[in-house]
Image (spheres, grey):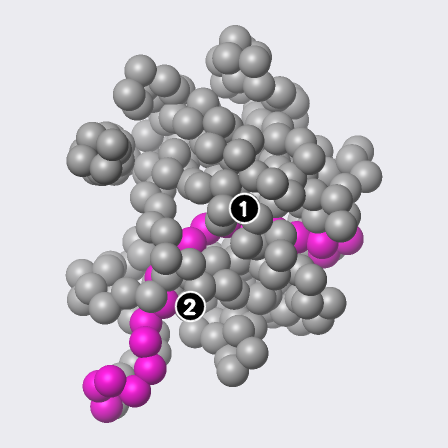
């Protein structure tokens, strides 16, 4: 199966405007995401999808490929779907433009999840026993069935534990692989009640009957939503190098 990585990136972030261009270790965040994604064995092409000329020019300046998209998109999925509509790849991997710690191995993992023909989407999760992460509504949790398919995603601590030590907790990692036709279908589908209630777009896929295969990864990723998050990533890179 052929695969491409699309990195949606917009300038007008509510909590951190221009974050894709915020400097991190001497490079804009989007360059970290692009360069790390380029290490994938299974993706034939990497591109940034943006509605910002500043981001487009920044990507072009470091030798990356960028594509201009509509400014009307409500989500990164919609932005990725606009680009994917003109591509002939079997699988599209959506890597968020604010994930500078993404690893190429994670991209390859979500591509491989779609070897299961029952899956329309693939994504990753990491086991956690940190009570602060479990209780934090900004950390999305996921529960899966016995074959690794997502049952539900939530900002709440799921599953509720009447008895401790029964099942592990999993933090969702926001990277997705889509079969091309599934991405186009999802982008064209109406938002759903659970999606609106939780503020989680992946619930639209579940409510529309799509199956999401979840792979467990040991890697941790820190999304940059605020300047404070950027400081955390800077510290992590300093201590791990």
Give percent across and percent down for residue 203: 53, 63
Give percent across and percent down for residue 229: 25, 37
| Count of numbered labels shown in the rendering | 2
**Residue lying furthest bottom:** 163
Q: Which region of the structure is painted magenta?
A: 163-182
Instruction: Give the Cα distance between marks 2 and 1.
Output: 19 Å
Give percent across and percent down for residue 92: 67, 45
Q: Are marks 2 and 1 in contact (CB under 8 Å)?
A: no
Which residue is rendered at x = 37% and y = 38% of the image? 101
Q: Is residue 166 magenta?
A: yes
Can residue 181 be seen by looking at this rendering?
yes
Which residue is rendered at x = 71% and y = 54% of the image? 179
**Which of the two labelled residues, at mark 2 and mark 1, occupies the earlier sequence position?**
1
**Labelled disc at residue 41:** none
Residue in front for this viewpoint, 202 or 117: 117
Q: Which marked residue is nearer to the observer: mark 2 or mark 1?
A: 1
Q: Residues within 10 Å of mark 1 (few under 14, many from 20)?
A: many
Residue in front for this viewpoint, 35 or 144: 35
- Residue 51 falls in image quadrant: top right
Q: Which residue is mark 2?
A: 142
Q: Residues within 10 Å of mark 2 (few under 14, many from 20)?
A: many
Tell whether 26 sits left or right of 147: left
Q: Secondary structure at mark 1?
A: helix
Tell whether 89 sits left or right of 43: right
Which residue is rendered at x = 58% and y = 66% of the image? 213
Q: Is residue 95 magenta?
A: no
- The quarter in which the C terminus is drawn is top left
Q: Which residue is mark 1?
A: 107
Can residue 53 be seen by looking at this rendering?
no
**3 above or below 35?**
below
**128 above or below 62?**
below
**48 above or below 135?**
above
């Amino acid at each position: 199966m052929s695969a491409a990585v699309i990195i949606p990136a917009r300038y007008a972030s509510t909590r951190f405007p221009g974050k894709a261009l915020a400097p991190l270790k001497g490079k804009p965040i989007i360059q970290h995401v692009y360069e790390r994604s380029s290490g994938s064995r299974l993706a034939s092409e990497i591109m940034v999808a943006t509605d910002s000329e500043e981001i487009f020019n920044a990507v072009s300046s470091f030798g990356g490929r960028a594509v201009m998209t509509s400014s009307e998109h409500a989500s990164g999925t919609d932005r990725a779907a606009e680009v994917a509509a003109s591509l002939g790849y079997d699988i599209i991997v959506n890597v968020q433009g604010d994930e500078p710690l993404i690893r190429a191995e994670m991209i390859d993992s979500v591509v491989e999840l779609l070897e299961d023909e029952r899956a329309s989407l693939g994504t990753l999760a990491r086991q956690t026993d940190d009570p602060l992460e479990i209780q934090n509504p900004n950390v999305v949790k996921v529960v899966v069935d016995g074959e690794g398919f997502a049952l539900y995603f939530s900002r709440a601590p799921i599953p509720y534990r009447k008895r401790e030590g029964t099942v592990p907790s999993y933090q969702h990692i926001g990277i997705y692989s889509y079969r091309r036709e599934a991405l186009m279908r999802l982008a064209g589908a109406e938002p759903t009640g659970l999606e609106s209630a939780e503020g989680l777009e992946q619930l639209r896929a579940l409510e529309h009957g799509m199956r999401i295969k979840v792979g467990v990864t040991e890697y941790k990723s820190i999304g940059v939503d605020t300047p404070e998050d950027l400081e955390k990533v800077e510290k992590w890179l300093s201590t791990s190098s």
